[in-house]
């Protein structure tokens, strides 16, 4: 299983033309085997922490096309 941890803005912003909403990503990486991770310096403030876990891909899934979403997702913030 692989894991990705991201530090993102707490609030979303809207695009000026299509009104698509997104959050700013300040850091995103895979943690070490013991679960620890370090980020570059981030200014003091309030952020949201997201963790995504991906199960190993099966032979069937490897043959499918399209985006592969996370198997699990958790947020804190």
Image (cartoon, helix red, strand yellow):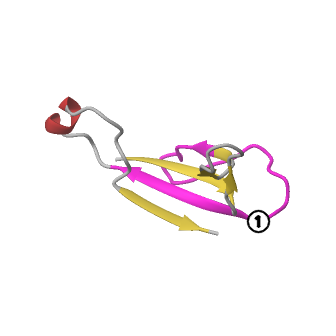
Q: Is residue 63 above or below residue 26?
A: above
Extreme-front residue of the structure:
17
Which secondary structure lies at badge 1? loop
Q: Residue furthest left?
A: 60
Residue at the extreme bottom of the image, as rendered? 77
Chain part drawn in magenta = 28-54
Indicate left or right for 62 with 13 as reference. Answer: left
**Residue 62 highlighted magenta (yes or no):** no
Residue 20 spot, x, y in % from top left: 59, 49
Q: Is residue 36 left or right of residue 40?
A: left
Of 58 and 34, which appears nearest the observer? 58
Task: Assess whether residue 44 is covered by the magenta stretch.
Answer: yes
Instruction: Give the residue number, with chain letter if any, for mark 1.
Output: 46
Front residue (pair 17, 55): 17
The location of residue 30, given as percent across then percent down, is 52, 43
Q: Relative to residue 10, is residue 51 drawn left or right?
A: left
The structure residue drawn at horizontal position 69% and vertical position 49%, both measured from the top left corner, is: 24
User: Which residue is at the front of the view, 46 or 11?
Assistant: 11
Dominant SS in magenta: loop
Identify whether 77 is placed above or below 57.
below
Please tell me which residue is depicted at 34% across the width and 47% down the height of the picture: 1
Q: Position of residue 22 (x, y in %)?
A: 62, 51
Observer-nearest of 23 and 26: 23
Label 1 crowd (10 A; few <14 / some 14-19 / many >=20): few
- For residue 46, which quarter of the picture? bottom right
């Amino acid at each position: 299983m692989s894991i990705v941890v991201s530090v993102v803005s707490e609030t979303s912003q809207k695009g000026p033309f299509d009104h698509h909403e997104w959050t700013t990503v300040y850091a995103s990486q895979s943690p070490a085997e013991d679960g620890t991770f370090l980020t570059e310096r981030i200014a003091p403030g309030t952020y949201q922490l997201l963790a995504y876990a991906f199960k190993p891909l099966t032979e069937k899934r490897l043959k499918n096309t399209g985006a592969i979403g996370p198997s699990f997702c958790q947020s804190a913030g």
